[in-house]
Image: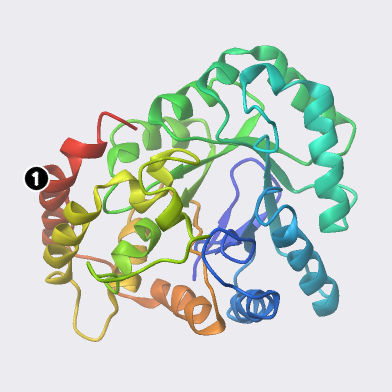
């Protein structure tokens, strides 16, 4: 894995990090023991970036991270968390400084730290991005020492472009994968120009790009790939990257033909993301140690050829873009 500066913050992170949604919840049965094992394996492999959120398992993900890091000791990886989705209802008016401070204080306790490395607004309503007072509040919380930096996790490219108009925003988390290629059309160049770190999430399109899901695959009732298939619980773009399931399976079979001998499709999909110089870190999740190790090893794949990258673009434009490109 390569190491990058995390934008304008004084952290250096590996280009593959650990996405901690799976060890929190909404991915079926992942025990705390499995979560700890997966995270330890990722850290043993050298990963130095962890991404979580206060709503992952209602704090379970944050608490597992805190316990694992405390037990390991030594130099800490960078830990980013997200806030805002605890609001009920989740509306723009809830993004007050008082509410954000309450969420941040809760995450500080869960993560057992005095200052959060990075706090991200967790896919807020678009209107929030047009309220300077929200970012002024984050600025005050940073000056108070509760957070070292702040950013935004977004659903749409337009939201990302709006967020980086605020000079204090140091990082953007956005969906970017073979099935969601729009961020590299304009946003990546703007983020690089402003030295904003980019965290690429949903890199395997909720497992579709692992190549292991078929039409007969079943998902547990508490797995978002079951209960959010049509966006019933949150933005449908978070589940299978918003691609209709049957279309995704068709595209996967075409992508499979491009995977080099000896490599897994998951590793190929992660290596594809790393071809974008603007990406600071990609955050695949892992349910167990084997998956965590495989994610780290994806960085060792040889760079993909111009022809292969062109072929993935053609598959995207022909099969996927009509469903997702202008939506997100």
Label 1 crowding class (10 Å Cα cut-off): few <14, some 14-19, many 20+?
few
Residue 80 image position (x, y, % from top left): 67, 51
Q: Residue at x 55, y 16 (%)?
A: 127
State left or right for residue 31 relative to residue 315: right
Q: Residue at x 69, y 77 (%)?
A: 36
Q: Is residue 202 visible?
A: no
Q: Position of residue 318 (x, y in %)?
A: 9, 45
Residue 193: x and y in percent read 46, 32
Q: Considering the numbered disc 1 on the image, is that residue within a helix, a strand or a loop? A: helix
Position of the C terminus by quadrant: top left
Residue 268, quarter of the rendered image: bottom left
In-image side of 209 versus 200 (left or right):
left
* Residue in the image at 64% along x and 74% along y: 35
- Residue at the extreme front: 221
Q: Give whichever of 143, 257 is nearer the camera.
A: 257
Is the residue 107 above or below the residue 193 in the image? below
* Quadrant of the rendered image containing residue 37: bottom right
Residue corresponding to mark 1: 318
Q: Is residue 93 left or right of residue 224?
A: right
Judge whether 142 appears above or below 28 on screen: above
Residue 321 placement (x, y as % from top left): 19, 40
């Amino acid at each position: 894995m390569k190491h990058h500066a995390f934008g304008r913050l004084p952290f250096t992170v590996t280009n593959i990090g650990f996405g901690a949604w799976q060890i929190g919840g909404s991915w079926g049965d992942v025990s705390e023991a499995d979560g700890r094992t997966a995270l330890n394996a990722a850290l043993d492999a050298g990963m130095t970036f962890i991404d979580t959120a206060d709503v992952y398992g209602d704090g379970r993900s944050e608490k597992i991270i805190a316990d694992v890091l405390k037990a390991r000791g030594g130099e800490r990886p960078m830990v980013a968390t997200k806030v805002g989705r605890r609001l009920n209802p989740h509306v723009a008016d809830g993004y007050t400084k008082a509410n954000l401070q309450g969420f941040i204080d809760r995450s500080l306790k869960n993560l057992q730290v005095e200052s959060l490395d990075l706090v991200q607004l967790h896919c807020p309503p678009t209107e929030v991005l047009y309220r300077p007072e929200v970012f002024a509040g984050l600025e005050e919380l940073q000056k108070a020492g509760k957070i070292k930096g702040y950013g935004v996790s977004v659903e749409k490219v337009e939201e990302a472009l709006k967020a980086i108009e605020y000079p204090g925003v140091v990082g953007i988390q956005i969906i970017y994968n073979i099935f969601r290629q729009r961020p590299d059309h304009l946003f990546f160049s703007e983020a690089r120009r402003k030295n904003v770190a980019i965290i690429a999430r949903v890199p395997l399109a909720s497992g579709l790009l692992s190549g292991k899901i078929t039409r007969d695959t079943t998902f547990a009732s508490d797995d978002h790939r079951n209960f959010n298939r049509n966006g019933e619980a949150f933005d449908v773009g978070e589940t299978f990257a918003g691609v209709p399931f049957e279309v995704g399976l068709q595209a996967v079979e075409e992508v499979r033909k491009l995977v080099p001998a000896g490599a897994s499709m998951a590793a190929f999909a992660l290596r594809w993301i790393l071809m974008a110089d603007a990406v600071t870190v990609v955050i695949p999740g892992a349910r167990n140690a084997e998956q965590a190790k495989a994610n780290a090893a994806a960085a060792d794949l040889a760079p993909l050829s111009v022809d292969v990258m062109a072929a993935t673009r053609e598959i995207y434009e022909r099969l996927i873009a009509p469903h997702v490109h202008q939506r997100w």
